[in-house]
């Protein structure tokens, strides 16, 4: 009997002690910062990163707190992490976007929600930079710099405000030339130096600006060549009379680089502005026969020599007359 009594006593004492300890610990202050139910828990920072219009999440954005890495956003553009109490600056970065920051103040037990809107930067899809050397019986000799580029923006093409072509000592605002294209032509006399030749070997840049003021700069680009010599006409020239399907012949200079030719033919009625009636490029021969019979009247033609980069040099105008 004594043995059973001792065993029962131990059980009773164990149960009693358990209730005492439970009461003690349940009344103890919950000041463990890692106890999520404690008022002294570390603050919880929850955030979301979206595009500038708040329509699409930005995944894999880098989140920093006080310039130290904190987290990457998930596929929904969200992040959630516990941080220290105090004043902080939270910043978000993503390649191709303008960064964003917010200052926050956190206390123990706080749950802070923040949202960032990142402005996607415009980017260049393609660009072309060439020169034209023009001879003319009417206007003389001229040199022209031609720039054209295609600029896109992940936030939409309507986000692109302007594209600027930057040269040493000056810049030009390019004109829209299609949905995403921008183009520009600059004559030598529009340059501070008065000469396109002064740009040889210099660094040239394109800068795209969106409607929020964010911009991207692309380059450097350089001029590949200015073609000095020009093709010369052989026939018909000097107002010669020809049949309605004449053979046009020209002579090229001795180029040490590959060239093709572009032929332009204009109708030139007396007292009226000329009208382009033929423009054919990619010619490899210096002879071209008009395929469709021309109406009676005056015409003139010019021919360009074109290198592999698209730089061109143009002949003077050659006049002829079509007779029946």
Image (cartoon, rainbow, N blue to C red):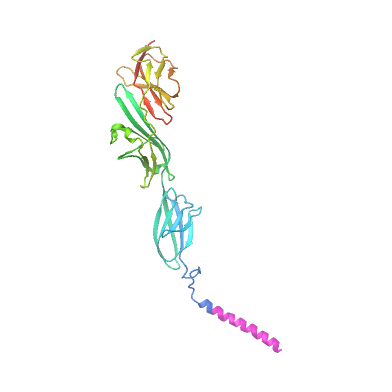
**Magenta region, mostly helix, strand or loop?**
helix
Q: Is residue 239 left or right of residue 117?
A: left
Q: Is residue 52 visible?
A: no
Q: Is residue 216 above or below residue 245?
A: below
Residue 299: % across, % down: 36, 17
Q: Is residue 123 left or right of residue 34?
A: left
Q: Which quarter of the figure is the N terminus placed in?
A: bottom right
Nearest the eye: 170 or 209: 170
Question: In the rendered picture of this protein, how many numbered marks are placed on residues?
Answer: 0
Considering every residue shown, the one lying at the far bottom of the view is 2
Residue 261: % across, % down: 42, 24
Q: Is residue 275 visible?
A: yes
Q: Is residue 45 above or below residue 212?
A: below
Task: Indicate whether residue 298 is drawn in magenta.
Answer: no
Nearest the eye: 191 or 201: 201
Instruction: Magenta stretch: give its range.
Output: 1-23
Residue 80: % across, % down: 48, 60
Q: Which quarter of the figure is the C terminus placed in?
A: top left
Task: Indicate whether residue 15 is drawn in magenta.
Answer: yes
Considering every residue shown, the one lying at the far top of the view is 324
Q: Is residue 89 above or below residue 157?
A: below
Considering every residue shown, the one lying at the far right of the view is 1
Residue 79: % across, % down: 48, 57
Residue at image location 31% in from the left, 28% down from the top: 142
Figure quadrant of residue 65? bottom left
Nearest the eye: 136 or 52: 136
Figure quadrant of residue 143? top left
């Amino acid at each position: 009997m004594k043995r059973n009594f001792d065993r029962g006593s131990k059980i009773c004492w164990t149960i009693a002690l358990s209730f005492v300890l439970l009461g003690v610990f349940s009344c103890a202050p919950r000041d463990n910062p890692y106890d999520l139910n404690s008022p002294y828990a570390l603050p919880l920072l929850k955030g979301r990163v979206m595009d500038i219009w708040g329509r699409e999440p930005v995944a894999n954005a880098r989140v920093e707190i006080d310039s130290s890495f904190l987290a990457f956003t998930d596929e929904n553009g969200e992040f959630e992490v516990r941080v220290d109490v105090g004043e902080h600056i939270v910043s978000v970065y993503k390649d191709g976007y303008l960064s964003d920051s917010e200052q926050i103040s956190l206390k123990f037990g706080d749950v802070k929600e923040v949202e960032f809107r990142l402005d996607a930067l415009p980017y260049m899809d393609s660009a072309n930079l060439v020169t034209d050397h023009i001879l003319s019986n009417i206007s003389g000799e001229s040199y022209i710099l031609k720039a054209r580029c295609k600029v896109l923006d992940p936030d939409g093409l309507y986000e692109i405000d302007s594209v600027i072509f930057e040269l040493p000592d000056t810049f030009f605002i390019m004109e829209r030339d299609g949905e995403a294209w921008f183009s520009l032509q600059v004559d030598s006399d529009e340059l501070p130096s008065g000469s396109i030749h002064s740009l040889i070997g210099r660094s040239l840049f394109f800068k795209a600006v969106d409607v929020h003021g964010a911009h991207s700069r692309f380059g450097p680009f350089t001029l590949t060549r200015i073609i000095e010599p020009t093709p010369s006409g052989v026939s018909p020239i000097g107002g010669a009379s020809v049949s309605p399907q004449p053979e046009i012949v020209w002579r090229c200079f001795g180029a040490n680089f590959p060239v093709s030719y572009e032929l332009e033919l204009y109708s030139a009625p007396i007292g009226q502005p000329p009208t382009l009636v033929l423009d054919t490029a990619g010619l490899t021969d210096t002879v071209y026969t008009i395929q469709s019979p021309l109406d009676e009247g005056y015409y003139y033609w010019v021919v360009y020599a074109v290198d592999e980069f698209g730089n061109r040099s143009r002949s003077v105008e050659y006049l002829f007359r079509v007779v029946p």
